[in-house]
Amino acid sequence: MFYLISFDVSDDRVRYRVVKALKGCGVRVQKSVFECPDLTEKRLAKLQTRLAGLIDHLTDSVRYYRLCGNCLQEVEWTGTGEAPETRVHLVA
């Protein structure tokens, strides 16, 4: 399933770790937004557990948006960017 994952993390070191975890699952499309094209439920759960263990639950947040195939065709943007990439990424 295709997921759009965004985060708001206040601590620079934690943010670096969150970005590192997300780079193993998808493509960074903005500073705090990743497109993850091939997350299975198992891989998503593993990622969620990993990120939940990194962030401060009182100040930080991570959001997961599931996008269906029809939704991907409707993605629009302004400025730089490309259509969502749907190729497979491997988790490191």
Image (spheres, helix red, strand yellow):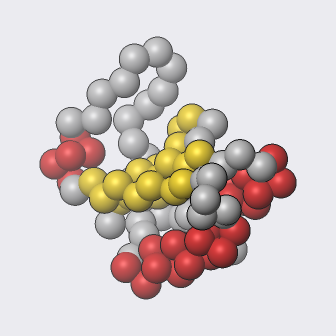
Q: Position of residue 60 (x, y in %)?
A: 61, 53
Between 62 and 38, the one nearer to me in the picture: 62
- 15 relative to 39 in the view: left or right: right
At 27% from the left and 54% from the top, the residue drawn is 67
**Residue 56 visible:** yes
Rendered residue at 45%/74% (across/down): 44
| Image position, residue 28 (x, y; %) | 58, 44
In this rendering, the answer to whether 4 lies above or below 48 is: above
Above or below for 79 versus 1: above
Quarter holding the N terminus?
Answer: bottom left
Residue found farthest to the top: 79
Asked whether residue 24 appears in the rendered view, the answer is no
Q: Residue furthest bottom?
A: 42
User: Picture quarter containing residue 39?
Assistant: bottom left
Query: Viewed as shown, does residue 7 lie left or right of 56?
Result: left
Between 66 and 56, the one nearer to me in the picture: 56
| Residue 5 on image: x %, y % | 47, 53
* Nearer to the camera, 53 or 56: 56
Where 53 falls versus 1 (above or below)? below
The quarter holding residue 18 reads bottom right
In the image, 6 versus 88, the foreground residue is 6
Q: For the C terminus, give its image quadrant.
A: bottom right
